[in-house]
Amino acid sequence: MPPPLLHLSAIGKSFGPNRVLDGVSLDLRAGEVHVLAGENGAGKSTLIKILAGIHADYDGRVELAGRAVRFATPLAANRAGIAVIHQELSLVDTMSVADNLFLGREPARIGGWWLDRPAQRRRALELCRQLDLELSAEDLARPVGDFPLSAKNRIEIAKALSQEARILAMDEPTSALNGPEVKRLFALMETLKRQGCGILYITHRMEEIYRVADRITVLRDGRWVGTARAADCPEPRLIQWMIGRELADYIPPRSGPARGGEQRPRLAVRGFGVPSPDPARPAAVRGFSVEVRPGEIVGLAGLQGAGCSELFQGLFGAYGRVCTGEVWIDGEPFVPSDPRHSIRRGLAYLTADRKGSGLVAGMSVAANISLASLPRVSPAGVLRAGVERERAGRQATALDVRLASLDQAVGTLSGGNQQKVVLAKWLETEPRVLLLEEPTRGVDVGAKHEIYALMRRWAADGMALLLISTEMPELLRLSDRILVLHRGGITGSFGRGEATPEKILAAAMGAAAGRPEAGPPPPAADALRVWPLACPAFP
Amino acid sequence: MSTARRWFEHSGTRALLALGFVLALGLVFNAGGAFFHWSTHRDMLRQVSVDGILACGMTLVIVTGGIDLAVGSILGLCAVLFALVSLHGGYAAPVAIGAVLLAGAGAGLLSGGLVARFRIQPFIATLAMMVFARGAAKWLSGGEKISQAVQAPDGSFAYVKLPAIFRAIDARVWGGNIAVVTLIFLACAAVTWLVLARLRYGRYLYATGGNEEAARLSGVPVLRAKLLAYGLSGAFSAVAGICQAAQEQQGDPEAGAGYELTAIAIVVLGGNSLMGGRGGMGLTLLGAMTIGYLEKILSINAVGDSSRLMLTGLIVVAAVLLQRRRAG
């Protein structure tokens, strides 16, 4: 038997006194997808970074096809045929798509001193054709920062694949992708497997693990827990491996019937529209209406660019006073104009991009929790440190944020705990309406479970919740009703019990609500050809 | 001990390290024992005060992730204004001081408005203000120093009496040991510390510098926070301008040229991040001491002007590198 593509033995890594990896070994064979599973902070990303040449200082051995290697730089790892797609994208926003695709290995002449821009353009176009990325020559010349997160993710994948890597490491590549996009990615992975690549894959989505994995390795607290063939490792066992205990129920079913049928709606929206930043394009959201009563969770589904996120931002006033239509909060008219005003009226908006627009990473946990409710802890403008710590501490305890100290910089917490800090920040504003966009993105299984329970509790306390989620099980189990958006308009509305993944997907793709599906979903290979980039994000 | 506290103490330690490095230079090159005289340290404090006052405002702006290049020019403009109003105009000290503070704050608010409202990059907006304010200073003064000598229309000179406020600011108290300008510097530092560490708006400044989008979506009045930072920076520049005018007993339209760079060097040597979102007045104080001692040690060793500039450049780099290696 030939040696495996990649063999890691007894890998260890410390950051100061913290031992984040200890004695981890694993094999990656040609033509397999090897899923690396574990809670946040288990050491998966660190392992990938060692492989990528980002951490050159580690213990243990890395062998490529039987040959011991040690990468000092990402470029060295690249040259050895390892391509990595990181959780945090490694694209330069200000540079064009084509420049990004070939960053570090630009086509050049005259001994590498003169950039060969025509050759780069040609090769970029060819790459897009091979990978069925629908990017025009103009798109390739636009800066990456113009594209929404999902498109950036695809550009990142294209960049990795263009390196003709034999070993592909993917750290949550689907976290910003929607259903069909994920399918396309998986189809691509199948192709790569057939070509003899080995793929190391990190994900937090249970259903994804079983869709892609040939083998699974679980890490916990930086140590190896087990490796098994996917078929031999059923979900309960996997979860037990990951968290060291069994979860009774992954998503708790709602207890009791839906509440508040006759109550006045907490949030009422009629004919709401959000204009597109580009007047030439159709509005981002058109004629959106909903009523959410106290205790209700209304789910919103839609493909990338359908307008879900824009709807939340418009309602929250993040775009300013540009939206059309009518909104009432507890029966009182409300005009979205600016986040400050919205917060005062009882709205809270958890964004999908925790790092970009949720947290101030360099500030302490206490300061982050009080950020949206500072007047409460600073009467007459003077901060009362004692009051702030007490309130923040109470929230942190209520949400079970695991931290060393309230003074700890929030950037040092794990993803799940960071998310709880953002939630704590919003709860401190005592909101009546919670707009939650991907509340469990980049959050480990244990913390997900806790966030679900919290959402249920807030609903029971009388808040109205609107939930955007690309995770179908989450959306289906948590929502009392699900509205589906397609190109800015509602194309489906399903009550609890009527909604199925198939119906939601059909509506999201523009099929009329309630109509039976016209046929089977298009095959993956076909879908691969349609990979449009959504419109640029709002400035 | 908590991580955040350890970090802060860590960056304080780093700033102390740079200061220690400069002091060690002083011990070695003590100019025949001159470094051990109390008067050397006393003079250092006095000489660094004007730059220190500018660094207070610079700290506020840098915490928001910006930069204020206009502080030196606003100093010059305000020195001229103060001399015009007080020396030539003969207005009472409180009126003159009030008017000059308003002018400085106004200039700061104007750059702040360009940055916050019109989203011009701080470097560009304050560069424009730097040029504009220098021009305004020259225009108001007719390009001449505003001194006690007043030229009459017939070309003869008359001398006006120096107002008491000039002498008061240039005086020393406590047996001649502490200069009034040093006390003014410490008062400005106290105000800055109060804003950053104790006021709600201080938190707004940190949040704006740390993650502007997250701050905005959390209801932080980002626009007003920036206006406050630049406005206070302008007001501090005015304070520095008054001090400078009092020390020189005249309003020089060229006063303060290049001071913005010293103020930035003070903030950076203290270990504040130019990226914004972190740092504080304590660090800036350490940075001010470091720069102050550096200049003083070079001057007591009678290092010539050209060598002094080159050595300053080298030592600043050495001190910053020293901080970083220890931090790593």
Image (cartoon, coloured by chain):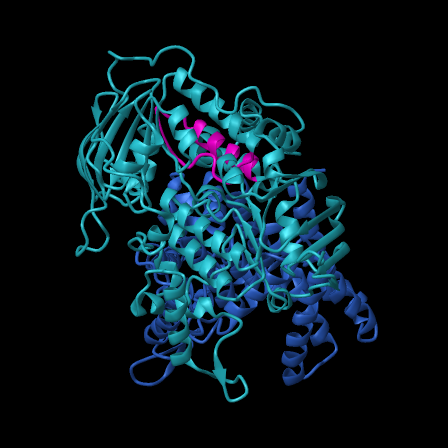
Residue A423 part of the magenta-drawn span = yes
Q: Is residue A205 visible?
A: yes
Image quarter hosting the C terminus of chain B: bottom right
Instruction: From the top left corner, tell me how far across and down residue B17 is, in percent.
Output: 74, 59
Instruction: From the top left corner, tell me how far across and down residue B155 is, in percent.
Output: 33, 85
Instruction: From the top left corner, tell me how far across and down residue A148 is, in percent.
Output: 36, 53
Relative side of A42 to B107, left or right:
right
Chain B hue? blue
Residue A67 part of the magenta-drawn span = no
Measured along the vertical axis of the image, is residue A509 above or below residue A495? Answer: below
Residue shown at the point (22%, 50%) measured from the top left:
A276
Using the rendered view, name the quadrant where residue A461 is placed: top left
Instruction: From the top left corner, tell me how far across and down residue A229 is, in percent.
Output: 63, 39
Relative side of A340 to A248, left or right:
left
Letter of the cyan chain: A
Image quarter hosting the N terminus of chain B: top right
Residue shown at the point (52%, 66%) measured from the top left:
A163
